[in-house]
Image (spheres, helix red, strand yellow):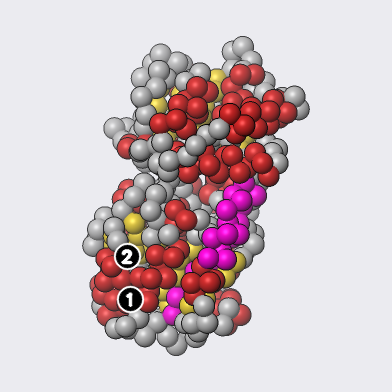
Amino acid sequence: MTGGLDAYAPFVGAGTIEELRLLGDQLRNRRVQNINSTAVGGGVAEILNRLIPLLREVGIDARWDVMRGGDEFYAVTKAIHNGLHGKPVPLTDQDVEVFRQTTEQNLRTLELSDDIVFIHDPQPAGFIKRRAPGSRWIWRCHIDLSSPWPAVWDFVRESVEHYDVAVFSAPQFSRTLPIDQVLISPSIDPLADKNRELDPHTIDSVIAGLGIDPSRPLVTQVSRFDRLKDPLGVIEAFQLARKYNDAQLLLVGGSATDDPEGREVLAECRERAGTDPDIHVVELPPTANIEINAIQRASTVILQKSLREGFGLTVSEALWKGKPVIAGAVGGIPLQITHKYSGILTHTVEGTAYWIKQLLNAPEFARRLGENGREHVRQNFLLTRHLRDYMLLFLYLDHLGESLVGLGADGRGR
């Protein structure tokens, strides 16, 4: 990582950097093992890719392992993911057996002996059965658990309740558990290729390569091709708004190795778009970070029309570019957007279409939304705040039984 912690001082101030180093001194040489289900694609992998080097820089012996699983396992975990988001999912005995067999296969090859084992999401949740004496375990849930399908949550909870602490992204995601719970929001890295400043030539080149007309307004949604992101609803909303405004729509996203439904949803979007020359459906590889950055910076309005959402970091990414964002009022998105101040929150296709039309017709209002949104992200959702919260959590695990000093009433800290 170029520049290390000091490179963040222009965004958050030298005092914040000094505080992070002091916290690191209290945790020097502490061994922390992170485990998730994919090395590329999705927000969890992106965050770990940026946080691990910073944890090491402040003196924590942090590492990151990715569990292994086959297509059958990831089909099961996608069903579990949908069930935790509230979809009625029939979790069969065969599904449970596939999940447990994959867990056992991983446990035969993974060493789980670090001081802190940090498990991300449901896929590796069962690893807790191999807990070493004296180690502390964290389950980090990046999913909207506000109304899970009971049978699916009961299955996951069997493992989660044996952890020391569960971490959620928003207050409404917390569940009744016999362990401590902490609220820590995800973050974006302002220095990453997806978020750093770009020169105009790079932006123009990316847009031209996608066949986008730079002289006409561009409405964009950046997200994985997932039904819970409602890409078909985005197309419908755009078509309604286009009756009143000339514009283009770009649906752009990548895939993840642990999401087998992505190809199906991509095909559905292309079918719905048909031959409409103003609707562009583009799949990019998970590594296309500069391209995503350029697309967001070239957009007039950015959407995140999620039906359910864990947090929705694409919202923070878009706000960081100073763009007006219209997003579903679900999951962690209302933590990022105050309606009509730092963005727009919607509930329906018709409402989304209305606000697309409004923002295209009111560029000064759209500009103010973008400015306010960027400042809100700077104060609350940058990587340095995330790093601080995790270090405070590690310190808490060193002193179980004491209060969670420093995280504040909302659990996020600053």
**Residue 146: x %, y % from top left:** 35, 38
- Magenta stretch: residue 139 in it? no
Q: Which mark is residue 49?
A: none
Residue type, label 1: Leu
**Residue 222: x %, y % from top left:** 49, 63
Left or right: 192 in relation to 102 = left
**Residue 345: x %, y % from top left:** 29, 58
Q: Quadrant of the C terminus?
A: top left
Residue type, label 2: Val
Left or right: 103 in relation to 146 = right
**205 versus 42 height, above or below:** below
- Residue at x 40% of width, y 18% of height: 178
- Residue at x 47% of width, y 39% of height: 89
- Residue at x 35% of width, y 70% of height: 237
User: In the picture, residue 101 is in which quadrant?
Assistant: top right
Dot 1, crowdedness within 10 Å: few (<14), some or many (≥20)?
some
Left or right: 48 in relation to 244 = right
- SS at badge 1: helix
Residue 131 seen from this side? yes
> In this figure, which residue is indicated by the disc labeled 2?
349
- Magenta stretch: residue 267 in it? yes
Left or right: 403 in relation to 391 = left
Circles 2 and 1: CB distance less than 8 Å?
yes
The magenta stretch is: 248-268
Residue found at the very far right of the displayed protein: 109
> In this figure, which residue is indicated by the disc labeled 1?
240
Of residues 377 and 384, which is closer to you in this image?
377
**Residue 96: x %, y % from top left:** 59, 29
**146 versus 295 height, above or below:** above
Dot 2, crowdedness within 10 Å: few (<14), some or many (≥20)?
some
User: In the picture, residue 413 is in which quadrant?
Assistant: top left
